[in-house]
Image (cartoon, helix red, strand yellow):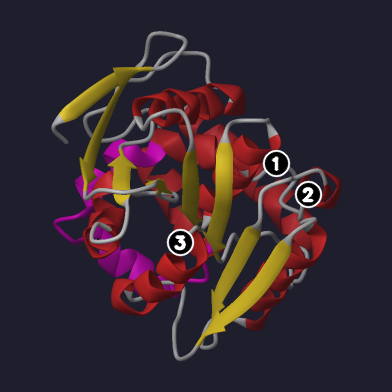
Amino acid sequence: MDKKTLSRDGTSLAYARAGQGPAVILVSGAMSTGGTVAPLAGLLAPHFTAFWYDRRGRGESGDTAPYAVEREVEDLAALIEAAGGEAALYGVSSGGALALEAAAAGLPVSRVAVYETPFADFSEGGAEERAAYTEHLTEALAHDRRGDAVELFLRLTGLAEEMIQGARQSPMWPAMEGIAPTLAYDDAVMGDGLVPRERLASLDAPVLSLAGSASPDWLRRAARAVAEAAAKGTYRSLEDQTHMVDPNVLAPVLTEFFTP
């Protein structure tokens, strides 16, 4: 990240930009930094000024206690200001929930695209599973059991137990533990874990909700529910894609949606 801006509470935010044209800000999900969406930014750069950033508490960005979702909305406000005063937003996974909340909060957002925001309305465990996750995550982080917190998140995503234990032995595990406290941030962004239908109905900006055809049924149904709840919502399925969407498949779809 080669640029910095300050959020309203003084938190330093690291970001990068590429390209020329209307501004599009990319919002990463849980257990990730802005580098996760950098390849997508490169593909959007021929058509837009693409911005990607480290959310607070991650990468090169700072952090300021206490955390609140409103602070992350203010972070996006600072980035939109740096982008010229208006921007489109793209959010992946829980980053999609943040992008939607920023638009609903009245930020100058022209359009919002989200990919598989994991609202639990149609998952087997539903809101109860989300509530249990929140309780156990809060306890693990309160006792600085970062590895346990990461395990809880990986289980929530449906990762098999043997793969979780394998991840513990991988070279990436220390970095995952380092970012573990921000799991609480994404959990807060997801609210009660259910599609915020009334909030989405208040949106003026067009919303594109995307899912992969090879993703679990509950994620695809949740993505469709987001589009149905938004006042100007559209749902689209990307053939053969999973939650780890291929930027080369995603970029043309976003380019079409974000083009004025």
Label 2 vs label 3, nearer the camera: 3
Badge 3 element: loop
Q: Magenta residues?
A: 157-180
What residue is shown with label 2?
Answer: 196
* Sooner in the amino-acid sequence: mark 1 or mark 3: 1
Identify the residue at image location x=78%, y=55%: 128
What residue is shown with label 3?
Answer: 259
In three-dimensional space, the C-alpha distance between marks 2 and 3, rounded to whole angstroms, equals 27 Å
* Sooner in the amino-acid sequence: mark 2 or mark 1: 1
Q: Which amino acid does label 1 sit on?
A: Gly
- Left or right, 212 with respect to 121, comes to left
Q: What residue type is labelled 3?
A: Thr
Report which quarter residue 151 is drawn in: bottom left
Q: Quadrant of the N terminus?
A: top left
What residue is shown with label 1?
Answer: 191
Q: What x and y, as percent, mark residue 98?
A: 56, 42
